[in-house]
Image: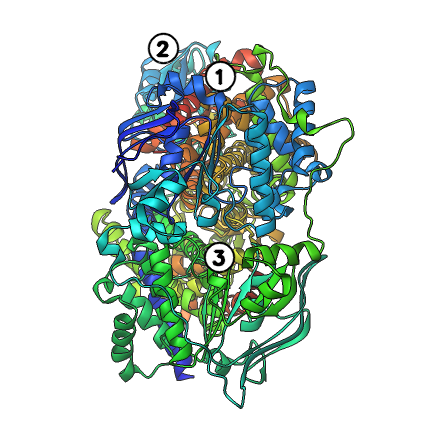
Amino acid sequence: MRSQLANIYRLGVKELWGLWRDPIMLVLVVFMFVFTVYSAAKAMPETLNKAPIAIVDEDASPLSSRLVSSFYPPQFLRPAMIPLAAVDSGMDAGDYTFALVIPPDFQRDVLAGRAPSLQLNVDATRMGQAFTGSGYIQQILLGEINEFLQGHRQSSVLPVELALRARFNPTLNKGWFGALMEIVNHVTMLSILLTGAALIREREHGTVEHLLVMPVMPAEIMLSKVWSMGLVVLLAAALSLRFVVQGLLGVVIEGSVGLFLAGAALHLFATTSMGIFMATLARSMPQFALLLILVLMPLEMLSGGSTPRESMPLFVQYLMLLAPTTHFISASQAILFRAAGFEVVWPSFLALLLIGSVFFAISLARFRKMLSQLA
Amino acid sequence: MNSLPEPALRPAVVRFQQVSQRYGKTLALDGVSLELPAGCMVGLIGPDGVGKSSLLALAAGARAVQAGKVHTLGGDMAERRHRERVCPDVAYMPQGLGKNLYPTLSVEENLQFFARLFGHAAGERRRRIDELTRSTGLYPFLDRPVGKLSGGMKQKLGLCCALIHDPELLILDEPTTGVDPLARSQFWALIGRIRAQHPGMSVIAATAYMDEAQRFDWLVALDAGRVLASGTPAQLLAQTGSHDLEAAFIALLPEAKRQGHQAVVIPPLVETAGEEVAIEARELTMRFGDFVAVDHASFRIRRGEIFGFLGSNGCGKTTTMKMLTGLLPASEGQAWLFGQTVDPKDLATRRRVGYMSQGFSLYSELSVAQNLVLHARLFQVPEAEIPTRVQAMSRRFGLEQFLGALPNALPLGMRQRLSLAVAMVHEPELLILDEPTSGVDPVARDNFWRLLIELSRRDRVTIFISTHFMNEAERCDRISLMHAGRVLVSDRPQALREARGAETLEQAFIAYLEEAGARGEQPVPEPAVSEASLAPPPPPPSTKTRRRGFSLARAWSYSLREQLELQRDPVRATLALIGSLLLMFIMGYGISLDVEDLSFAVLDRDQTTLSHNYVLGLSGSRYFVEKPAIRDYADLDRRMRSGELSLALEIPAGFARDASRGRAVEIGAWIDGAMPTRGETAAGYVQGMHQAWLAEQSRLQLGQTAVGAADVETRFRYNPDVKSLPAMVPAVIPMLLMMIPAMLAALSVVREKELGSILNLYVTPVRRSEFLFGKQLPYVLLALFNFLLMVLLAVTAFGVPIKGSFLTLLAAAVLYVICATGAGLLASSFTRSQVAAVFLTMIGTMIPTIQYSGLLDPVSSLEGAGAVIGQVYPASHFLTISRGVFNKALGFADLRGSFWPLLVSAPTILLLALLLLKKQER
């Protein structure tokens, strides 16, 4: 037992040396955890950021110009003033997400209490903006009109106010979310990639078979890759969290970073096993690359890191329960944003442990089989 | 040094003047000046890594000249024009068995490919291929994939491919390394016949076998990038006063290298009475499917013996060794090590065996000392002994000065010794060495043998070694001759020679091979085709098409080949097609921006009809699902933290009373902001509900008809139900159509670089543009097919109809896949390894398509670098077109604006790839 642990440790150290002396990989790791995390936070706009809007003003009254001037950056681009005929072509070309039509005699009708209608065209293929934007625009318009009417007319409603506050991310800053989810995604992507590439590289150089004539068991070889590559990714994630996210981007992390890293370690156990599994499936680098795309894309898009899980169809939700990323993302969101403690996230941890063990067992079986075919 | 008289006053076919080549820190050629006479057989001799290959590659124009001048066929090879002019007259066969051939293609397809590159018409191609293959004996194997040919046959095919265009100069880089002696003698006989028919042809060949070199007309001995001597074999022998070339070569080496060299003396094996058996194999057989790699091999090796395995590449030597080490379970038969059955699970026997595999599997990322220490530890040498052991090993094998160096920085001979030291670090009783000396110079090889002999005779270590060098085989106590998986015979080398009455071991081996029926690939006697037909027909001047402008035929040749390779590797194409459909399915359904079923709960401190009525407004909508009521603040906090609640409401005590009395009340609402998009949408919903409830209340309670001052009529266009699916499906197509074709194309070029067939770009008349466009075409077609499948899936399975003009979409798709495959080619044009190409393509396609091309957020709303990327990236524009056609019922006229960027970026990307691709190796 002791000698096995020693072997696992020594072979793992060898992996670390291998990575250290492979500058391309190192540059890649740094690039991913510094540059892309930063750019994900910065490029990710607020839902309403520079939303392109066009206005057809057929009224040309003080009220209509007041409405026009209520749309300004950064939520909106300066409104494009267009004739009615240009609405269709502009929206077709995707120049505007919103086109507002102010009908003739709008101000007169409002003052006369005839409740005229404004027409708001929304490009509903741009889902995100379409949703939040249309509600927001309505509020702005009605607010302006009501203000305009102050003194002109009395409106009475119940004196009930809604005090709406967002918790955990009071300004709903998407950059925070983007940066943290980017780290979470990179943990998955890099761990699969590094372990898979490490195994394929050893296979190409013929050093795996060399290991096999030594008194070393396949499980030891595999565990050594799991811990060493896992450690690298964990360390990179921790540094990125501390210096890029908290330092450079100034994101406030409410929860315990230690607990998050513990979750990440469990997650890495599962993903590094997956990496080995995929490397045993692929016969060549091209096949590994295609497999990588096939696996990573759903993991990144469907685990709740980019869109909310509860809006996905049920079968996708259930299917994705088998993926470690789903649990890891749910745990990370709870820990990092909502400061949840272990008593809250333990089910996710348990799931990660279970999934990891299953993946590890399957990979080990595949790995043994590959070794016997390889020789 | 070149003071020897020139032979026959022949004009030089290749002339080197002060040529130096440097790769990184290694100086491969050091001021070489040399003239190689035309019309004869010129041989370059010397071990690996002395610059032979560099010289040949320079002469062929495959490598760019760094310093000095190289003249081939009367012109400067540094000039592009001259290279283009002479390229059809030069044939170059690189080192490595079938390195420039395509293993998945058949013999015929390979030949057709090369013949097309040189612009022969179909009839002419047929005639030449038939002639060449008949005379080389490959004719019966035209349909066989090259990967399944034997080493000798591969070399013959390589020769056929080189000869297909009647070159004036034939350059062969170690054509017979790793080929069995019979095939080797056949190969040189073939060259002899060809030369007889083309008297004007010059042949330059590199070889590591000194016995072959003996037959050449003119020799150049090289060492460490310098010319040691040149002249006819007789002159070299006379100059050094030696009786064979091996000895002559050693004599030519500089003093420092020769130091300590002495002929290897082998003390006789002391026969012990007990005759302990170290290895015994009985009827050992290994099958891979139908292929029998080892066929009932039996032998027995005594303790302390040096036992040699002799045979060509692929005859089963390595497989046998692997079975003995337990790496491969035997299909049949049994083997014993030290009297115990070989059992892969038995770790104890492994400790008694040292194994050195082909190509010295050292960890190139660990230093010499680290390699030794790691192996010592893995073999459980007690920790306290390790430093002394490592020291002893490095002293014994002469590695002391190199302990801190990385293996790849060491000369080959050093690496070989390190590899042996590593195999010996745990003091095994048995050493299994798989071709340990290939590519090592004679002096280092002799030193290595002295170590082996010492181990065997002094330490009584049993040594089981495989080799294809005859003079090494002579040094073994006993050898087994292997051919096609069978052990032909096992005995002392002397006995084998005597049994066959042969002068040399090589001749004895050939005799055994012939007896075993390994006649191999003899020329097929063809009544109508006499030997004379090898002579080229009076070549009409037009057959030698000079490179003039872009040639569709050559591009087509590459296209055809790439297409065939794709067909032969169905996994790749299938993975791409099925994978993209699968992904589209998953993501089309999975990525949903609809925010529904948000969970909420209420902390109702009022508990009146009015407060219940307020909550009803929320729970009745499809956007919210009500959870059990909240008990107190602690409960609220806990449930929000766990993510169970997306929205929590607090209705204060006295809510109904205060409201009806006109006193201001405030309802508290908290939304989960962890996921901002969801938070924003939820906030919008709650506010909407609140307004609606207020209006309703004023109508009911105050009897007032809530007429707003104005109202906003919102029309959701193109997607009236505001569903994710119709919006996402047209967006997923551009995403997948960028990533997968780019990845496929990227690997196609860089793979040629790794496997070596990129040489055909360097030395044949093909242009870079022909190469790139030719390779791109099959991937463009595959991607278009993929596109059609995805559209079909969108229309049928997803029920997202194409409202606009399909032709417009198709036209855009054509442009777009040209961009996508072009991007892949671009990524692979300057990377060297497949791994790097994969990463680059992945980063270059996945991140921009997902984040910056308008999939989730419109490009116009992006900030900073992301906005710039989004505006120029082709995916953004194809996305606009795809959504325009699918959702907005648009045609070409409406989407013209998005076509321009695609029209510009497609050629730009290709042009960049073209500029970055090199026509010569640097």
For the residue labelled by badge 3, is the local secondary structure a helix, a strand or a loop?
loop
For the point 50% across and 44% down, which residue is it? Answer: B595
Question: Rounded to the nearest whole Å, what is the CA distance between mark 3 and mark 2?
Answer: 97 Å
Q: Chain for mark 3?
A: B
Quarter of image, res B496: bottom right
Asked whether the viewer can see residue B541, the reply is yes
Can marks 3 and 2 be said to lie on one chain? no
Q: Position of residue B616 (x, y in %)?
A: 53, 51
Q: Amino acid at mark 2?
A: Ala
Is B224 located above or below residue B653 in the figure?
above
Q: Residue at x 41, y 75 (%)?
A: B267
The spot of residue B106 in percent (x, y) is 66, 38
Q: Secondary structure at mark 1?
A: helix
Lateral position of residue A95 relative to residue B864, left or right:
right
Nearer the observer: mark 3 or 2; the answer is: 3
Q: Nearer the viewer, mark 1 or mark 2?
A: 1
Is disc 1 in contact with disc 2, using a CB cutoff of under 8 Å? no
**In the rendered view of the protein, which quadrant contains the N terminus of chain B?**
top left
Q: Which residue is mark 3?
A: B469
Do labels 1 and 3 touch, CB within 8 Å?
A: no
Q: Which residue is mark 2?
A: A60
Choose top left, top right, bottom left or bottom right for residue B266: bottom left
Where is residue A325 shown, x and y percent of the image?
47, 57
User: Residue at 55% across / 65% down in the picture?
Assistant: B309
**From the viewer's perspective, is A276 left or right of B539?**
left
Mark 1 crowdedness (10 Å alpha carbons): few <14, some 14-19, many ≥20 = many
Q: Which mark is residue B899?
A: 1
Name the amino acid, label 3. Phe
Residue B156 x, y percent position in the rendering: 59, 39
Instruction: Tell me if residue B784 can be seen.
Output: no
Please state which amino acid type lies under the numbered disc 1.
Answer: Phe
